[in-house]
Image (tube, coloured by chain):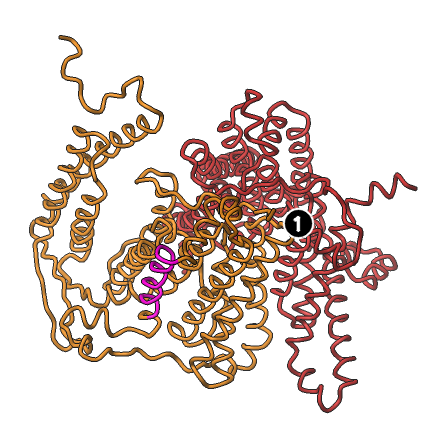
Chain colours: A red, B orange
Amino acid sequence: MSGLRRRLRPLFIPALAVLSAFLVGSIFLVLTDLKNIALLPTDPVHAVTNAFGDVLNAYRALLQGAFGDPARFATAMQTGTPKAWATAFRPISETLLAATPLIFTGLAIAVSFRSGVFNIGGDGQFVLGALGATIVALALRGAPAPVTLVAALIGGIVFGAAWGFIPGFLKARTGAHEVITTIMLNYVALQIVQLSLRTDFLRQSSSSQPISKVLDFVRVPLLIPLTGLRLHWGFVVALLVAVLVSWFMFKTTKGFELRSAGLNLTAARYAGMSAGGSIILAMAVSGALAGLGGAFQVMGTVTQMSNDVNSGYGWTAIALALLGGTRPGGVVAAALLFGALNNGGHGMQVETSIPLDLLVFIQALVIMFVAAPNLVRMIYRLKPKGSEPGAPAEEGAAA
Amino acid sequence: MTAAATPVDVILPQASEAERRALRFARVRGIIFAALGLIAFLFASNTMDTQATFKFWLNASGGSELSISASAGVLWILAGVITGATGIYQLTRGAGVRWRRWLALMLPFWIAATVGTLLAGKPAVLTQVFAGSLEYAFPISMGAFAAMICERSGMLNIAIEGKFLIGACAGSVAASMTGWVIAGPIVGMILGALVGLLMAWLAIEHKVDQIISGTVVNFGALGITNFIYLRILQLNTDLNTPPTIETVQIPVLSQIPVIGPILFSGTPYLYLAIVVMFALTYMLFRTRWGLRLRASGEYPQAAGTVGVDVIRIRYRAMMLAGAIAGLAGSYLSLHSAGSFQMNMSAGKGFIAIAAMIFGGWNPIGAFGAALVFGFSDATQALLSSLGVDVPPQLLTSVPYLVTIVVVAGLVGRVRGPAMAGVPYEQG
């Protein structure tokens, strides 16, 4: 029993953080409902019950959007047709699909945090990875599909790693603060993508929008061959990559060096490790992971390169890395949670017309509460604890 | 006599690391400048026949104009001579040369020659370009001032973007509801200061990393303003139709030819930015408050030892910065667009941080940097309005690339406050 409690303890603060974020989110939901507020002076009882009902309804729609409707599962059990099963499983499939890019970027940021560098450039590395995959795929058009697919994935890794290498190199060689350079490189990456989408090589000539040719010839294979389920093998690869990252960071010498650099750069340097090398390696690995995520996104989920291929995955990843305690397993769990939130948010938006952006706000609150565990302890009157296991690497160098 | 005439820039073994580095950079700069000079001459040979015409308005209405014409080739030759000479000077005289002044001298020629060539004979009205640069510079410079106050006090503030959005959204709603324009900036300031307070509380009280708390605010502000726009403002458009801030012609000064229409016919916001720039320069470097603020950012332990309340200074700096950023945010919805739109700051908060760094953590420098960024934006608008097919992405990237180059120390090193972002334990 006590063993179980010890195992569950690290989950305690994150769980309370998510709960608190949802509570604050529901306060905003109530405050922005002008109809109920107008009703308040004349009919306070109805106004309050309506407000409660709306919040519960919204979160119910969120859950159903994320995990599926029990009624649909019941139908599927009775009829047993593949179509009914597909309908029942579609929300879960979409949740896992939404989690896939988040796992990649979350792992990317977690690796950088563990190594003591603040990679805020996940966005740029992600879109350039997608761009790299698109370029390679179009260049190898006509080659056997598996070859093209693998080459394009490597292209994504290389582009992402290069975009992570630049700030790493600048930090190691000139001391340029990586937070500033990665933020700037995010914007440069967007401009590069737009510029590339002007070229005839990439551009879909029939479209007036800056969007690439369709990459249907290198689709990442679907995981479950049922119509309506879009989940592809990228998700499985994401899980394997998480295992790989875990092995690399915790079982190899290089990983040990990276973690030492993250804990205390000066000590690592005195122990004979190359501080500059660690920074560059951490940023390049981080960029490569984000780039691979971009490659899977463009060839598995959206099939066309455009600026919309990324929707803030690099920024969300910061939340994921923190929420998951910068451990690969934790990051995967956090990514699944956020994938469920994003996907469930769509369901909520469709059913209750509450804007999806509420979840962006809730995600920001989750970061805040996770980053300030004492705040959570204060709210719920928990006993303060000396140190937080798995807390993010301390980093606070001057810009 | 083998080692007789030793060139000045030979790296001597006893030279310190910093000196070697300076010499290395000076050589690289010299080679780059010399090469650029040659490139300018190559351009000149093809553009001797192209007339570059630049026009200035003589009064605010644009009735009469001052027109200046020159051959684009001549401009290229001038750019080439200055650049090449600087390069050769760098190579022969080493690191001690004040090359940044030469850079400032050569840049206008490069820009004039490039724009003149691209326009291929079409006249360009520069009054609009310069006025546009100033307009763009307002939010950027105010955001830079805000970030600067924080960093000078020892706090990192990457949440300028989020405060812009909050100021824009709240400002539009407040001005629409009351019908008074002035309510917008005031509410923007109040909310900005509150967000600054929240960030300071998280960072100081709860030891949240300041980059994380900044991310929380940026992310949260984007989510909440989008949410409010979609849930309330889109359906109740009367809450998002604020009265707009009119331009003010300063008497007498706005009548000066050429300068008047550029400098003295702007919005009150613009004049405010200039006032804040001078006030902040004075306050930072000439008052007790400024000395204590800077001490908190450079060496808080020392400041604390002599009795300065570092924590209180940092709280106040964050609130002041929040107010400035919120005020600047209200400009976005009350002036430029006339209503709040989703994500309307579009990265300006990050360019503001870039301007702060480019300006060397100095108000006048930051304003200058904001003008440079504004100029690249306005030039892009000019070129596309005249139908010149230049990918706008190239010019849009300029502020970001310049910032990377500056923080990497490739073009002159700038150094920020030593302890920005490091938590301080009051003993």
Q: Nearer the viewer, residue B76 or B199?
A: B199
SS for callout 1 = helix
Label 1 marks a residue whose chain is A
Residue A396 drawn above or below residue B191? above
The residue drawn where x is 15% and y is 32% is B88
Is residue B276 inside the magenta stretch? yes
Magenta portion: prevailing SS class: helix
Q: Position of residue B60 (x, y in %)?
A: 20, 76
Name the residue that disc number 1 marks.
A99
Q: Nearer the viewer, residue B101 or B64?
A: B101
Quadrant position of residue A5:
top right
Q: Position of residue B189 (x, y in %)?
A: 48, 70
Name of the residue lying farthest toward the top: B1
The residue drawn where x is 68% and y is 38% is A328
The residue drawn where x is 62% and y is 50% is B208
Q: Nearer the viewer, residue A267 or A137?
A: A267
Name of the residue lying farthest toward the front: B306
Quadrant position of residue A3:
top right
Name of the residue lying farthest toward the bottom: A42
- Residue type pointed to by label 1: Ala
Residue A249 drawn above or below residue B243? above
- Tell me where the magenta segment starts and ends, as one range: B272-287
